Image (cartoon, rainbow, N blue to C red):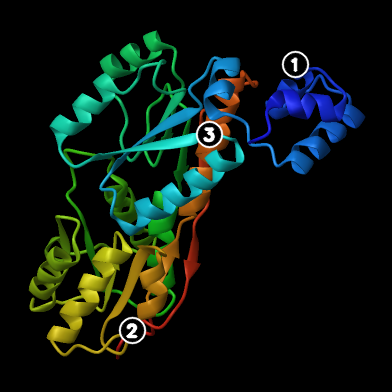
């Protein structure tokens, strides 16, 4: 028969309330007593009831994570960081996927219920002001990842700085003719991260008296196949670029496929740089901008746990730096 909290209290020589405080990691327990209770838990192989713990804390111990495009590699990495953080905090994750505007609106309307969750983490989407007002009436804390709202805590990466980093890497190698493959400039869902990366690249080029030709800027659906089609059109042009910056590794792989289809050597005739540094980037040898995807998830959980526990507020916006990862798809500009 499984051990109970009463058994733990008897072996440790304390009351049930003390055992409960240890299980819930409350601070008002003498260190020696805490160690004795933990030894008793280990000796009895005691597993606390999740339902009982929820009742004692008056919480659900669950966090809702609402994300765009669940299967994208960058999203999977962010979720990995969130899950690790929630496990450490003794919380559970409930994931909701958004693929349409109707699904987004329904989730932001129906999910924020204190009887179901203790908080919400939103990846690559932000509530409108009316939606935020409804969420605030529920009393639930909200943390954003890769999204912006002036009134909400958020963890983001330096997209503009990443675009500048990519362009400067190519400029240092002598490139002067640039192309860009990215997402739709005004996405119906999500935030314009792709445009922010383009903006950063444009700033770096402007500092060198350069600009991308309009025909060498192509934006559309965020898929490898679509990126390949956009790139093939670009590379068939009269003034094709010697370097292409892609807004994600997924799109950069589409660029590499287009170059191969047109028998254009990478990096001899064309340099290609991606963004994210997902696992596939290493596999294909893609030079890319690394953003700490898993860390954004972990940092968002830290923010959430602080809000739930009533910790002192910290600055709303936390920006994590990005870095260049050089592999074999970038090289000197062709003569």
The answer to whether residue 242 of the structure is visible from this angle is: yes
Disc 2 crowd, CA 10 A, few/some/many (<14, 14-19, 20+)? many
Q: Which residue, given by chain and number where applicable, does mark 2 sit on?
A: 333
Examine the image and state in which quarter residue 55 appears.
top right
For the C terminus, the quadrant is bottom left
Image location (x, y in percent) of residue 47: 63, 36
Examine the image and state in which quarter residue 24 appears.
top right
- The secondary element bearing badge 1 is classed as helix
Q: Which residue, given by chain and number where applicable, does mark 1 sit on?
A: 17
Numbered mark located on residue 233 in the image: none
Image location (x, y in percent) of residue 170: 38, 73
* Frontmost residue, 39 versus 131: 39
Q: Tell me if residue 256 comes above or below residue 74 in the rendering.
A: below
Hey, which residue is sitting farthest front in the picture?
A: 1
Image location (x, y in percent) of residue 59: 52, 19
Examine the image and state in which quarter residue 247 appears.
bottom left
- The secondary element bearing badge 3 is classed as loop
- The secondary element bearing badge 2 is classed as loop
Q: Which residue, given by chain and number where applicable, does mark 3 sit on?
A: 91
Sequence-first disc among 3 and 1:
1
Residue found at x 19% / y 66%: 224
* Frontmost residue, 261 versus 167: 261
Sequence-first disc among 2 and 1:
1
The answer to whether residue 320 of the structure is visible from this angle is: no
Structural distance between the alpha carbons of marks 2 and 1: 70 Å
Judged left or right of residue 234, residue 256 is right
């Amino acid at each position: 028969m499984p051990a109970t909290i009463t058994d733990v209290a008897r072996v440790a020589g304390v009351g049930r309330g003390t055992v409960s405080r240890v299980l819930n990691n409350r601070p008002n327990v003498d260190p020696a007593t805490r160690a004795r209770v933990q030894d008793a838990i280990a000796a009895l192989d005691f597993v606390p009831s999740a339902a009982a713990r929820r009742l004692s804390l008056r919480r659900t111990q669950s966090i809702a994570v609402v994300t765009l495009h669940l299967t994208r590699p960058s999203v999977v990495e962010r979720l990995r960081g969130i899950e690790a953080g929630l496990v450490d905090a003794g919380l559970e994750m409930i994931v909701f996927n958004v693929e349409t505007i109707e699904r987004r609106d329904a989730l932001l309307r129906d999910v924020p219920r204190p009887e179901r969750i203790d908080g919400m983490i939103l990846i690559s989407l932000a509530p409108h002001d009316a939606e935020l007002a409804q969420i605030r009436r529920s009393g639930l804390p909200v943390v954003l990842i890769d999204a912006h709202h002036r009134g909400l805590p958020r963890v983001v990466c330096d997209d503009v700085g990443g675009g500048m980093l990519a362009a400067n890497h190519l400029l240092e190698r002598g490139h002067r003719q640039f192309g860009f493959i990215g997402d739709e400039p005004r996405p119906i869902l999500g935030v314009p991260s792709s445009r922010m990366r383009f903006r950063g690249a444009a700033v770096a080029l402007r500092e060198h008296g350069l600009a991308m030709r309009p025909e060498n800027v192509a934006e559309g659906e965020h898929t490898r196949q679509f990126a390949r089609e956009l790139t093939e059109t670009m590379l068939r042009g009269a003034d094709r670029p010697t370097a292409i910056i892609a807004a994600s590794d997924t799109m950069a792989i589409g660029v590499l496929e287009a170059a191969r289809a047109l028998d254009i050597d990478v990096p001899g005739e064309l340099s290609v740089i991606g963004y994210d540094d997902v696992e596939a980037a290493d596999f294909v040898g893609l030079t890319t901008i690394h953003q700490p995807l898993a860390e954004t998830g972990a940092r968002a959980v830290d923010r959430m746990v602080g809000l739930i526990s009533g910790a002192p507020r910290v600055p709303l916006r936390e920006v994590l730096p990005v870095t260049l990862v050089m592999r074999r798809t970038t090289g000197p500009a062709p003569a």
